[in-house]
Image (spheres, rainbow, N blue to C red):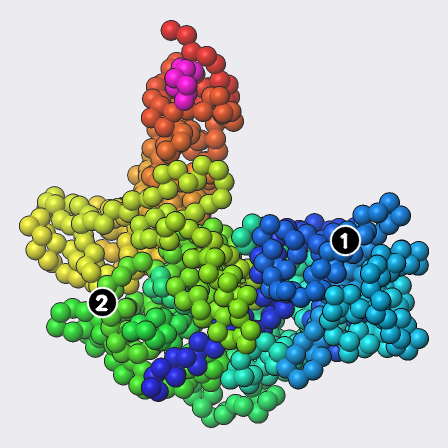
Amino acid sequence: MKKILSAYKILIWSSVIAIILIPLIFLVLVPGSGSSNNKPGVSSETALAIPTDASAFFLFKDIETVSNSINSANDLFGRIIFGNSPLKQLIDKLYSVSGAETLKDVIDHGCALSYHYSSKDEVSPLFIMKLKEGELAYILGSLKDGNSQTRQYNGISVYKWNNVEYAASGGFILASPSPLILESSIRHILSGSSILDNADLADLLAKTVLRETMVFINHAQCGKLFSAYSNRRFLKYSDFISRFTSWSALEIYSQENKIILRGGFLNSKGPANYSEIFRGSNTVNSIIASVVPHNTYSLLTISVQDIQSFLKKFNEYGNFFRRSDQEIASKAAKWFATLDAKEVGAALIPYGSVNWNTIIIRTDRPFFGFIKRWLSKDDEIIPLPFYESGYLKYLFGDMFHEEENSHILRNGEYIIIGNNEVLTEVFAKKRGKFSFDEYISQTKAHNLLDRSSGAMTLIVNGSEQPDSLVKFFKKDANLKEITKSFNLMLGAIQLKPDKQGNPAYEIFFYGDSLKDLPQPGKASVESPAGWERDTIVKIPAGPFELINFSSGEKEFLEQLPNYWLRLSDKGMNGIWAVPFQVPLRGYVQQVDYYRNGKLQMLFAGGNRVFMLDRNGRFVSPYPISTDSLILLGPKVYNVKKDGDFAIMLLHTDNTLRLYDKNCKPYPIWSDIRLPETIREFPELKDFGGNRYWILRTSLRTMIYTVNGIPVTDIKEKNRLKPDSPVIPLPGSDVLVQTLQGRNISINLETGEIKRYKH
């Protein structure tokens, strides 16, 4: 029971991010609202009618933007915010009335929607629309049609329309299902006060470029949102959300089945705001997702490239609330410093019907010095008891607490801490080789998250546990209905420094209903047309044939089920085995790195390229990390015909990149990208005294210069067949064949295309 409660406690961290931005769940898949461009007339003027106690508010460019958000064919926005609320009908009525010729200017007036604590455990909306005097009279007359209920409040007429009260004051029309909130707005307008009197908000607005749809969150008031929306057992987490920052401002962009939010926040309390920890943070390319299983529920990663700076700020935050034990924190910091860590992660991994919290630490070097301690008689890496319990929690917060009786597993460059059985079955035995990163890479959500620049990133996959996304809320009927319409649901929140080093947000939610969910062995997904055709990239599994440079006999390198690498002779008898932690990416190439006749083995895994000598020793300066995960490779070429080699890799973003022998970007190289899936490496051929790349896909043949530049802009009518011959002609011309079967010649130097005549 303790284990289940322990795992369940960490599950709350995922809810924290969901509830951190409770107003944002209103926005899940806001259809067609938001824009990446500045819009003329977008103003914060309507905020003058918002009372000072607002927990959050939206600014809309105009009434049409609001109506489109509510009434689009995919009206999740309306369903989540309004449900069956009569406020939706009132907004529809206002939009309908604004179409009159008399009100032709109304379409350009801004709108706002704010949320306020109205009674015990209740939050109510207030809708605001800016109008001129004549427009107000016309609209009030239209709304009063058939309505006889009127009352007075502070000299202002208050009307009732389908259980919504509305009034006109200060050049605004105000509407709310809560009389208390409507009266509060009237009082604020009459007294000349508003939410804009908040100095922090005013400071944030001065720094924010307003877009077509914006949301502003008052974190000091988030406790009221918790009271209204979350189940009672989660109320205690509102303290952390209130301290996360002072105010947030986010632009909302939505298209089809995804929503993206980008923006920043204002930390007025210095180290008392948690997000201040990440100001000026150094980021690192996050690759922990490549070692956790595909069904991981959530993964939180933190860059620790500059661990001393991080710990200093984290301790300042802890000291501010007197929650830090300096003695334990000091011991923990000294222990962690010995690991040479670059990234830490906390993953919730389903196993035996429980989500187990598992901590992953990515270090800068493999732990080969510890191999003998962690080997069993079957040459499998085995977990051992973990004795530094509580250290990671002191260093990085409650989400990094270990399970009861945790064990530690050292696997190459990764240190994994968690439940013994989970470490053994999921990580050591590696019965499933399908990673969380590979899962995401097969969805259209993969390009929504930039893992190369995040200081802190949380990814939540609700696809296999849809109920988990709504269990935190008291009234979850609408949310349950929404989650039932998707079988794929991915969301992420990322903190990353902006150009000035200030922490900023990037958030997305993606939902889809797929015929087939991601499966092992498929390539990553891109959005351009044609990608859906022939998207499977076959990754050869080996054994990989080699040549013994001393005897000239065949040898083989193979990857064992536990990911270890074993060299075998021609009879497949093992010679040696070395530990390895990720799947090979389909190639093992032999190279003469030192140009002394002795060959090394070059191969890749994750985002790294490795080199082994024939005795099973890793060759310096390898392993070397690349900026992106590797899908296929490496493939080596003698580009300059000088006996040296260059390395080509196919990355998971469908990009071919060339590197020199030290795995540094090749000079004067242009990355090769295509809309369709690249499934194999190009040939390097000689024509007319120069070298060219011939790349074949399922849709075409492409020809590139040795620097990766297309030799010509081939229009659709001249697109080359996937199996087109490339036959040298006199000079720099080659004979090729189009999809229509026409023979054409291409001058590889000038790019000139001519119809070929025998």
The foreground one among 63 and 439 is: 63
First in residue order: circle 2 vs circle 1:
1
**x, y percent for residue 728:** 36, 18
How crowded pointer 2 is (Cα within 10 Å; few <14, some 14-19, many 20+) is rated as: some
State the image quarter where residue 681 is shown.
top left
Q: Is residue 24 above or below residue 95?
A: below
> Disc number at residue 429?
2
Count every numbered label the image shows and give the total: 2
Instruction: Specify the amino acid type for callout 2.
Output: Lys
The foreground one among 408 and 677 is: 677
Q: Residue at x 28, y 56 (%)?
A: 583
Q: In the picture, which quadrant includes the N terminus?
A: bottom left
Q: In the picture, which quadrant includes the C terminus?
A: top left
**x, y percent for residue 275:** 60, 74
Is 557 left, or right, of 656 in this rendering? left
Dot 2 falls on a residue whose secondary structure is loop
Q: Residue at x 37, y 53 (%)?
A: 518
In the image, is residue 743 part of the stretch drawn in magenta? yes
Is 43 left, or right, of 539 in this rendering? right
Instruction: Specify the amino acid type for callout 1.
Output: Tyr
Dot 1 falls on a residue whose secondary structure is helix
The foreground one among 31 and 739 is: 31
Q: Residue at x 60, y 50 (%)?
A: 73
Q: Which residue is mark 1?
A: 95
**x, y percent for residue 546:** 18, 46
Q: Main secondary structure of the magenta part?
A: loop
Q: Is residue 676 above or below residue 410?
A: above
How crowded pointer 1 is (Cα within 10 Å; few <14, some 14-19, many 20+) is rated as: many
Magenta highlight range:
737-744
